[in-house]
Image: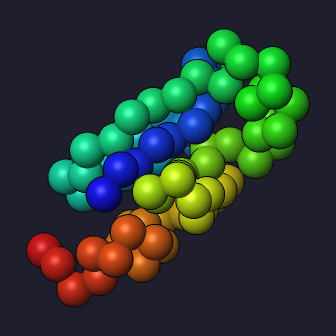
Amino acid sequence: MRLVLYGRPGCHLCEDAAALLDGLGLAFEEVDIEADDALLKAMLERIPVLEVDGEQRLELLFGAEDVRRATGTVGRA
């Protein structure tokens, strides 16, 4: 499973999402949307955005249960 977290520096929601993924023991790649004008335009008001295997599954406010459902890890420790 490949997880990508889209965000930008200074975004507290993005920092919270990264901490959540870390806390769940999930490996993920972080992408700074400010490095790409198209990403910035498309995602600025939606970040953080979590992509699972190439599909954008979660955005803005999400918690542990949301991540577990989106990643198919429901019921795992």
Q: How is the image coloured?
A: rainbow
Please say if 49 is above or below 72: above
User: Which residue is most to the front?
Assistant: 54
The image quadrant that residue 44 belongs to is top right
Residue located 42% across and 78% down the image = 69
User: Which residue is most to the left?
Assistant: 77
Residue 65 in the image: x percent, y percent? 41, 76
User: Which residue is most to the right?
Assistant: 41
Q: In this view, does 26 lie to the left or right of 57?
A: left
Residue located 26% across and 44% down the image = 27
Q: In this view, does 49 lie to the left or right of 30?
A: right
Residue located 81% across and 27% down the image = 38
Tell which of 65 and 27 is nearer to you: 27
Please say if 9 is above or below 21: above
Tell which of 16 and 26 is nearer to you: 26
Observer able to see residue 38: yes
Please say if 13 is above or below 61: above
User: Which residue is most to the top?
Assistant: 35
Residue 54 in the image: x percent, y percent? 52, 53
Which quarter of the figure is the N terminus placed in?
A: bottom left
Q: Give the number of callouts.
A: 0
The image quadrant that residue 24 belongs to is bottom left
Residue located 66% across and 13% down the image = 35
Residue 9 in the image: x percent, y percent? 59, 19
The image quadrant that residue 12 belongs to is top right
